[in-house]
Image (cartoon, rainbow, N blue to C red):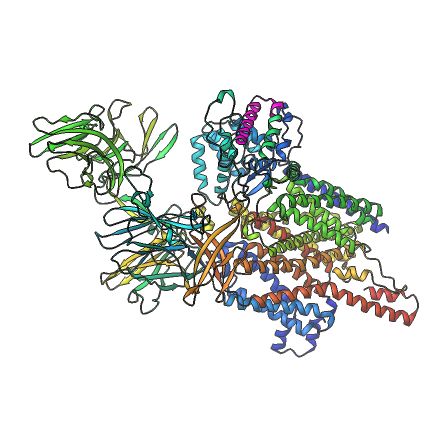
């Protein structure tokens, strides 16, 4: 590339006629025009890449990809390519010495063309592929159900009261085969916890590829650890009619990167209907009113209103108007309390000691489950009359009240060291009756669906029998044990049908610290513990109160009429993690039907899954939001990304790691590679295993599959590994790009290293000719040559 | 040589020496703050100096998916605690064992290194507020950045750390580093991570046995006679496990008693015992010894001193064309390359892969590529006047690279880590190595371009055609504009370097005016005319210059000898052309790799965008050179711009704008 080859274009052009086309061609032939375009490209690229805040601002709101596919960039590249073509054709004579320049310019134009094909047709996305599901065939139910193999995932089958419950308790990737031809091999295993409608519970262990080794594990009274049914019952399966089998879990779809879509379906349906959302913001929060959200930083209202049109005839919301009315990039829905119209005392407090400071969750005086702390040391009580302060506390001891309706008698037994005698103690007769009781033990903090429960275990002796009653502070939880000899019970031996001859109530000991709210809006603290004499004193928000020598409580918030509000809390920009990207985003969706408009914040889900199992025990979120329809049915909606069908359904047969020395130790740098063994569903069957790993993708039906995500073992080797994440994309035109790049490299080598040799040879020839002509020393000619 | 050119040469060498000195004075104090202590410090305690860890230096430890020598392992873990410098008077290995055996001695000893100064300042403020330390102590800690672990246990400090960890942009990373340091400083963790004993199964993928598991077995001494020995790890010979555990217990006792002779005996015994378990899994003692030596000697980054020694004679040979200086300079340069090559090969052997995986390796290997390519170019240019210039550029480049690695070990950690799975690919190898080699060439081109500018400036100074005061404006304006540009750039790209708005406008104003002055002065035709050197550039430019130099011409043709300016300009073009091809080829190979690894050849990642930007500048350079009259000046200006963009890519993009290529 030497300036000598390029004629002085401007001067030559000026000599010719200057029509508009010629002027334009002259402009494109001007090297300075090309250099100016290069400078503009440099500036454009630098801004897009190094100053993300500029392209991410509210006006542009573009991703890197969008910035580099925006029309100004396209215009620059097209102008540059045209200039390159024009200058090459018009100004660089096609000769051997210029072959390098021609090749470079041609190569670059080819690369640009290839890139237009490539990026113009590019589809790129990702898909999680799970390893197995359990096919469930319940006796008496015709259609089989499926349960995703992910520890924690569960499903219930049947109608009440005949409900079967299945839960994946554990999965292992390397269960050793201990017998048969494959002894010593390892297989994928899943343990399913089964609860039959009768309440009977057992575990079924399934081994992938070895259905003949399926067996059940049962629980027994003697041994809390599950034991092989074969050893306990004499047969491998508890229920021969229940069919559970491991199957491949096909994935039919992938989601497209950096897109938005809404998925709708009627509750109970299996198929989703997709509605792409276009022109959505990405980096900037868009709200209509500041009070739509909780935020600790100032937020300027900047509303949006985007219509999300129906996808087709099947769309259950086709008659409704669906609009996006707000967008938050990084927020989470939280619940907060504010002052409302109705009495509902709420207290938030923290405690500090020498060891540090602890904050407790709020207490609600009217909620029996939340009016005391989990450790039961602090309670929150509303006293209807301030005078009760003087008499508070009631007897702090635990009391068991035994009433005998038939005898018209009642006894209050304070529970303390003397009255709790254990299961070997003697019975205490109830005066004037034939009955006697023995208090074995008391226990607190037992977790039930409706909250923690405290119980007193009481043995009762009547003339006809002796039985045990577990008396709970929540009367709904009081039960009689049919076998008095075993307080721990067994399946089906507890009864809620209590012996009517006895009515027992149990009131556990009151907490040592009580916060007492009174109707006048004042708050008092009552101490009733063992480390100081009893006192009652008024407390105020924000003022620390020393309860005992080294424990100080501070009331952080006290509301008499608390009302709960659920709104998105916007995370301040400084606390937003870059790698979270759009995972924490949400939209305010307004659905307007003939019955009126409903607005709900809908959180983003990376994928739209068939059901809730995919959000259980996995790293994925599945949070559909429901809208009530005028016909009484509900429609559920998921906010996610556009979805495309894969050329063939794909399944993960096996996933394993290749590791550095010492094996996987919980850190990424101990992993050599991640291997997904895939199968494609073709012609009604599954293809052979195709391994893919990082740097080794595979192709199927025009799409390439790349290893991109995995399911790390949470508890060490042997767990996790239940799914893989695949990148999916096409790559049209990549060979045109590559060819362009390759020939331009060849051109550069020619231009810089071959052309000088050709020129040197020509120069030597002309020198030789000159020498032959003159045969004399001609310094002046030398100067001419040197210039 | 005419009087005029001798004058110029004197001026040039004086100005070069002066600027080098000024630069050194400016940089040295800042760097010296991080300079490592000499390996054999004078104040080493007698116990520490009498302990012979030699046998352990040749013993393998398995951690983080690698087998390291004990010294290398200790350096990595102590690096998490106390930064990349060894604690005062102690080797990394000694400190590691001392923190296990005499853990309580370290509770109040300043061993926790806090890298981020602003973050440390905020913590120290809390410590002063709660009266844990005096303000004067806070100042001292701020200077050393080493604090005792006990200071972090105060509830107020802990709660401040919690608060700061929520700021993911500014302080989350320093908090997590600090928590990591406090965690690693626990003796239990150090014991857990000390895996001397190979798995008895002999399986490569089985984990090695931690000393914590072996140390938990009761020693066989009179005090523990009859005690059950139930903790022997599965598969390990109980006898051997007992011996290792005994030796460890005795080592601990001797260590606590500061009985160096007994310590040395137990260390030798321990090293011998652990090798008996699955010996086939242990690397050779020679390879481990080499690794320990390599790390004890700062990853051989001191080679910068040899490069430094070659620079002065090479510069003299370029300017004065003295053969003696050339011989000395090239001799020292050869020596430096040999040592540099040795360091690359040692690292290759130790890590088991070509060293180009982290920042330390990318920088030192790029420098090595530059030096090797300079040797090739020196061979090609051995008969031209450009000779020595490539060696000079490479010597400066390699010296700077190794100096950074030597003086800033915390910013550029020399510890060896495993490659990420995505990086394990042959195309990637070629791509990254070609790219970093082209970067080294761009840096060398920057050196010759700077020499060209200095030459032009020196010539004008020597001719006295321009008022010297006015001539001084140029370098001063360049320095001001450069610094202000850097400040603005950091303001734009780094959230931690944000300026208040009024300061930002002041900086923009400074850039504008200094840039204006710079442009006016640099391109003032009048000034150039007065300097009598409007055009001075290599006739054919680039590789053509080299190839035409050897042309057979008839005796009557006497070409005018090229000036120094033409030589500098020609060398810049040789380097720019070569880097043009290599950078483009490297980008293409990167695209091929990305296409089959991530499914797209180009992802607009900042690192690749700025590699493209560097390439765009070189394209502009080649085409601008075709059109302008003052080719030499424009070539130099654009070569320097290309060098600046390349450095921006390497430093700012890597450390501040994190992208996919953040590993190197």
Q: Is residue B454 left or right of residue A74?
A: right
Q: Is residue A597 left or right of residue A114?
A: left
Q: Is residue B114 above or below residue A74?
A: above
- Taking depth in this image into account, of A342 and B340 the one nearest to the observer is B340
Q: Main secondary structure of the magenta part?
A: helix
Where residue B627 sits: x, y (%)?
Answer: 70, 65
- Per the image, is B242 magenta? yes
Q: Examine the image and state in which quarter residue B255 appears.
A: top right
Counting the numbered discs, the total is 0
Residue lying furthest top: B222
Q: Is residue B616 above or below residue A166?
A: below
Residue A621 in view of the camera: no
Q: Is residue A424 above or below residue B462?
A: above
- Per the image, is B464 magenta? no
Where residue A376 sits: x, y (%)?
Answer: 27, 33
Q: In percent of the image, x 17 and y 41: which residue is there?
A: A496
- Taking depth in this image into account, of B477 and A498 the one nearest to the observer is A498
Q: Is residue A330 above or below residue A561?
A: below
Q: Is residue A160 left or right of residue B167?
A: left
Where residue A160 sits: x, y (%)?
Answer: 21, 53
Region in magenta? B239-264
- Taking depth in this image into account, of B500 and B296 the one nearest to the observer is B296
């Amino acid at each position: 590339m030497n300036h000598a080859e390029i004629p002085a274009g401007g001067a030559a052009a000026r000599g010719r006629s200057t029509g508009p086309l010629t002027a334009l061609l002259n402009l494109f032939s001007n090297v300075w025009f090309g250099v100016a375009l290069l400078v503009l490209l440099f500036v454009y690229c630098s801004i897009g890449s190094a100053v993300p805040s500029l392209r991410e601002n509210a006006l542009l709101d573009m991703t890197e990809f969008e910035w580099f596919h925006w029309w100004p960039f396209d215009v620059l590249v097209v102008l540059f390519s045209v200039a390159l073509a024009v200058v090459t054709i018009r100004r660089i004579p096609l000769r051997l010495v210029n072959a390098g320049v021609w090749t470079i310019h041609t190569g670059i134009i080819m690369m640009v063309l290839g890139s237009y094909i490539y990026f113009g047709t590019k589809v790129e996305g990702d898909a999680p592929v799970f390893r197995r599901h359990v096919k469930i065939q319940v006796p008496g139910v015709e259609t089989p159900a499926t349960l995703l193999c992910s520890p924690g995932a569960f499903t219930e089958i049947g109608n009440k009261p005949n409900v079967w419950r299945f839960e994946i308790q554990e999965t292992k990737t390397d269960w050793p085969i201990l017998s048969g031809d494959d002894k010593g091999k390892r297989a994928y295993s899943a343990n399913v916890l089964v609860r039959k409608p009768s309440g009977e519970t057992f575990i079924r262990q399934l081994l992938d590829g070895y259905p003949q080794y399926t067996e059940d594990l049962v629980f027994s009274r003697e041994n809390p650890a599950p034991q092989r049914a074969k050893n306990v019952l004499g047969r491998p399966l508890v229920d021969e009619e229940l069919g559970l089998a491991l199957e491949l879990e096909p994935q039919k779809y992938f989601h497209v990167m950096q897109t938005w879509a809404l998925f709708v379906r009627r509750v109970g349906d299996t198929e989703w209907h997709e509605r792409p959302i276009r022109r959505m913001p990405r980096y900037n929060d868009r709200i209509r009113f500041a009070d739509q959200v909780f935020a600790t930083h100032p937020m300027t209202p900047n509303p949006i209103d985007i219509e999300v049109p129906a996808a087709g005839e099947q769309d259950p919301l086709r008659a409704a108007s669906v609009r996006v009315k707000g967008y938050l990039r990084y927020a989470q829905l939280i619940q907060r309390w504010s002052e409302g119209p109705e009495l509902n005392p709420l207290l938030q407090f923290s405690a500090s000691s020498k060891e540090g400071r602890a904050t407790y969750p709020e207490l609600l005086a009217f909620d029996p489950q939340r009016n005391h702390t989990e450790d039961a040391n602090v309670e929150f009580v509303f006293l209807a009359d301030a005078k009760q302060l003087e008499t508070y506390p009631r007897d702090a001891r635990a009391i068991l009240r035994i009433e005998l309706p038939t005898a018209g008698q009642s006894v209050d037994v304070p529970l303390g060291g003397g009255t709790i005698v254990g299961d070997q103690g003697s019975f205490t007769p109830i005066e004037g009756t034939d009955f006697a009781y023995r208090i074995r033990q008391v226990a607190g903090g037992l977790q039930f669906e409706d909250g923690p429960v405290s119980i007193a275990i009481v043995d009762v002796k009547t003339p006809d029998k002796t039985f045990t009653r577990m008396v709970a502070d929540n009367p709904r939880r009081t039960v009689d044990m049919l076998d008095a000899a075993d307080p721990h019970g067994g399946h089906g031996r507890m009864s809620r049908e209590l012996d009517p001859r006895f009515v027992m109530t149990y009131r556990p000991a009151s907490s040592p610290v009580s916060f007492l709210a009174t109707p006048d809006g004042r708050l008092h603290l009552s101490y009733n513990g063992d480390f100081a004499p009893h006192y009652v004193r008024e407390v105020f928000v924000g003022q620390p109160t020393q309860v005992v020598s080294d424990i100080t409580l501070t009331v952080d918030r006290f509301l008499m009429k608390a009302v709960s509000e659920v709104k998105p809390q916007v995370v301040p920009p400084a606390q937003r993690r870059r790698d979270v990207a759009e995972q924490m985003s949400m939209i305010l969706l307004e659905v307007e039907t003939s019955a009126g408009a409903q607005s709900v914040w809908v959180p983003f889900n990376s994928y739209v899954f068939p059901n809730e199992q995919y959000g259980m025990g996995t790293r994925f979120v599945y949070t559909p939001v429901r809208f009530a329809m005028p016909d009484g049915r509900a429609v559920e909606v998921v906010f996610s990304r556009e979805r495309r069908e894969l050329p063939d359904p794909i399944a993960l047969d096996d996933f394993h790691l290749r590791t550095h020395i010492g094996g996987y130790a919980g850190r990424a740098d101990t992993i050599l590679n991640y291997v997904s063994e895939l199968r494609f569903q073709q012609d009604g069957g599954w293809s052979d295993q195709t391994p893919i790993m990082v740097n080794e993708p595979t192709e199927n039906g025009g799409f390439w599959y790349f290893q991109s995500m995995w399911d790390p073992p949470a508890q060490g080797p042997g767990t996790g590994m239940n799914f893989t994440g695949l990148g999916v994309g096409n790559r049209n035109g990549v060979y045109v790009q590559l060819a362009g790049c390759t020939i331009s490299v060849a051109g550069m080598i020619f231009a810089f290293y071959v052309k000088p040799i050709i020129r040197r040879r020509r120069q030597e020839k002309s020198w030789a000719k000159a020498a032959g002509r003159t045969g004399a020393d001609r310094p002046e000619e030398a100067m001419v040559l040197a210039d | 040589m005419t009087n005029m050119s001798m004058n110029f040469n004197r001026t040039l060498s004086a100005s070069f020496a002066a600027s080098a000195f000024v630069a050194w004075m400016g940089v040295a104090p800042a760097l010296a703050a991080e300079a490592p202590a000499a390996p054999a410090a004078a104040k080493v305690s007698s116990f520490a100096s009498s302990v012979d860890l030699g046998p352990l230096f040749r013993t393998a430890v398995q951690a983080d998916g690698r087998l390291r020598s004990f010294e290398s392992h200790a350096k990595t873990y102590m690096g998490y605690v106390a930064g990349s410098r060894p604690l005062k008077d102690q080797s990394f290995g000694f400190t590691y064992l001392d923190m296990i055996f005499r853990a309580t001695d370290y509770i109040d000893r300043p061993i926790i290194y806090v890298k981020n100064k602003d973050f440390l300042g905020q913590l120290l403020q809390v410590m002063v507020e709660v009266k844990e330390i005096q303000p004067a102590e806070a100042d001292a800690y701020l200077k050393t950045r080493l604090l005792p672990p006990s200071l972090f246990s105060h509830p107020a400090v802990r709660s401040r750390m919690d608060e700061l960890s929520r700021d993911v942009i500014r302080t989350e990373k320093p908090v997590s580093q600090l928590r990591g340091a406090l965690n690693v400083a626990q003796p239990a963790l150090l014991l857990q991570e000390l895996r001397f004993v190979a798995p008895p199964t002999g399986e490569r993928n089985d984990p090695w046995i931690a000393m914590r598991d072996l140390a938990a077995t009761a020693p066989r001494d009179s005090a523990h006679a009859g005690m059950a020995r139930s903790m022997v790890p599965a598969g390990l010979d109980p006898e051997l496990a007992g011996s290792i555990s005994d030796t460890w217990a005795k080592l601990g006792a001797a260590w606590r008693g500061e009985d160096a002779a007994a310590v040395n005996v137990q260390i030798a015994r321990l090293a011998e015992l652990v090798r008996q378990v699955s010996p086939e899994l242990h690397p050779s003692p020679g390879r481990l010894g080499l690794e320990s030596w390599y790390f004890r000697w700062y990853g051989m980054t001191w080679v910068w001193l040899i490069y430094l020694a070659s620079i002065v004679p090479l510069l003299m040979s370029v300017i004065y064309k003295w053969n003696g200086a050339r011989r000395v300079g090239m001799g020292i340069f050869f020596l430096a390359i040999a040592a540099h090559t040795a360091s690359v090969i040692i690292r290759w052997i130790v890590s088991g892969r070509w060293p180009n995986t982290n920042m330390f390796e990318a920088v030192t290997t790029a420098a090595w590529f530059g030096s090797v390519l300079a040797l090739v170019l020196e061979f090609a240019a051995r008969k031209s006047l450009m000779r020595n210039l490539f060696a000079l550029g490479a010597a400066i480049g390699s010296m700077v690279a190794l100096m950074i690695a030597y003086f800033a070990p915390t910013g550029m950690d020399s510890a060896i880590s495993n490659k990420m799975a995505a990086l394990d690919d042959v195309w990637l190898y070629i791509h990254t190595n070609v790219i970093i080699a082209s970067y080294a060439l761009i840096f060398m081109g920057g050196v010759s371009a700077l020499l060209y500018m200095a030459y032009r400036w020196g010539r004008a100074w020597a001719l006295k055609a321009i008022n010297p005061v006015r001539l001084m404006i140029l370098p001063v304006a360049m320095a001001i504009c450069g610094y202000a540009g850097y400040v603005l750039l950091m303001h734009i790209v780094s959230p931690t370097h944000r300026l208040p708005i009024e300061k930002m406008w002041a900086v923009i104003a400074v850039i504008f005016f200094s840039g204006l002055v710079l442009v006016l002065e640099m391109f003032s035709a009048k000034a150039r005319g007065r300097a009598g050197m409007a055009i001075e550039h290599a006739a054919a430019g680039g590789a053509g210059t080299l190839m035409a130099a050897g042309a057979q011409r008839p005796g009557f043709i006497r070409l005018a000898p090229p000036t120094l300016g033409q030589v500098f300009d020609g060398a810049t073009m040789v380097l720019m052309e070569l880097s043009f091809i290599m950078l483009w080829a490297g980008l293409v190979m990167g695209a091929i790799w990305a296409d089959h690894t991530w499914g797209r050849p180009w992802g607009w990642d900042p690192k690749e965008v700025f590699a493209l930007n560097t390439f765009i500048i070189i394209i502009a350079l080649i085409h601008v050179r075709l059109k302008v009259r003052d080719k030499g000046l424009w070539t130099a200006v654009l070569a320097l711009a290309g060098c600046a963009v390349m450095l921006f890519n390497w430093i700012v993009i890597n450390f501040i704008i994190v992208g996919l290529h953040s590993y190197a």
